[in-house]
Amino acid sequence: MSHTSFATTTRGLNRELPPMRLYEKAKKLGIWNPSDIDLAKDKQDWAGFTDEEKDLCLLLLSMFVAGEEAVTLDLLPLIQAIAQEGRLEEEMYLTTFLFEEAKHTDFFRRFMDEVADAGADLSLYHGDNYRQLFYESLPDALNALRSDPSPASQIRASVTYNMVVEGVLAETGYQAFFTMLERNDLLPGLRKGISLLKQDESRHIAYGVYLLSRLIAENPQEWDNLQMQMNILLPSAIGVIGDAFARYEVVPFGLKEEDFVNYAMSQFSKRFERLEKAKGASLDEVNKVAKENEDS
């Protein structure tokens, strides 16, 4: 398709749009190098872990690294769908997603290679619920945008990626790592990397909330679709947590399943409440709410 005009030489860039403000943050905060993180103390700590403690860490690492790889592989159709609509500010911010997801993949694999010596096939840690989300639902939802970039398909893709994969599962995984490691000051390099990628992911989720809010404001008839997608995916997300805890008679590091199920449900409810505010809202109101949450 040929171009008939360019935003930068006609209307210019709207730097007050939420995606442009997120882009400014990404340029400042998203430039960190996984190769620069010191893992020397992590190697010492890892050597002192029990087999069960190592197993739980490998389980979490295997789910994180495959999840980061999955979104790196599957993200392009969303970027293309937004670009085809001429939403330059959103596309500019989305260009940072791919770089950051690839960087997260790099970080987890580096830790696994240099500290955990994880040479075996770790896909054995991926249970049915995990496979449903990352092997099927995520690629299906994002790749559907290649042939159908409609608002309904964009809602399905963003709910799957931003609200459930990032907003529920990834954030619950961060909570597990910090609960395990901070109280005993273990694996400082891993904690440093996770804190940096958590910062990246918080921007991704903020964009997802904005995107879905904009889509609902523009297409209020799609609210039932959004709600249905959230409810379809939630059981698998909670199931991933249950599958992880079911692996152990005594869970390493004193973790309790109910703490993380409650945390996951809290994250789900928080996102859902934010999205409900978009029903019947104008685009100006969507932008205002996004700025209020960004500044809070």
Image: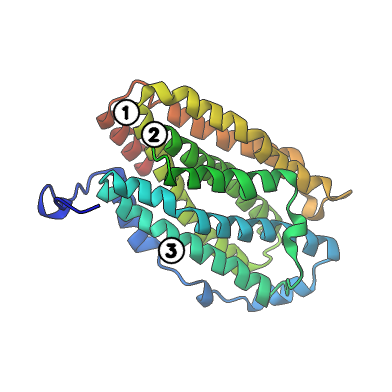
Sequence-first tag of 1 and 3: 3
The answer to whether any part of residue 93 appears in the image is yes
Label 3 to label 2: alpha-carbon separation: 25 Å
Q: Which amino acid type is shown beneath numbered disc 1? A: Glu
Q: Which amino acid type is shown beneath numbered disc 3? A: Phe
Label 1 to label 2: alpha-carbon separation: 9 Å
**Residue shown at 40%/21% (left/top)?**
221
Q: Nearer the viewer, residue 264 or 135?
A: 135
Q: Which amino acid type is shown beneath numbered disc 2? A: Pro
Secondary structure at badge 1 equals helix
**Residue shown at 34%/46% (left/top)?**
82
Please state the horizontal and vertical placement of residue 157, each as a whole percent of the image.
48, 41
Q: Disc 3 designates what residue?
A: 99
Q: Nearer the viewer, residue 128 or 65?
A: 128
Discs 1/2, front:
2
Sequence-first tag of 3 and 2: 3
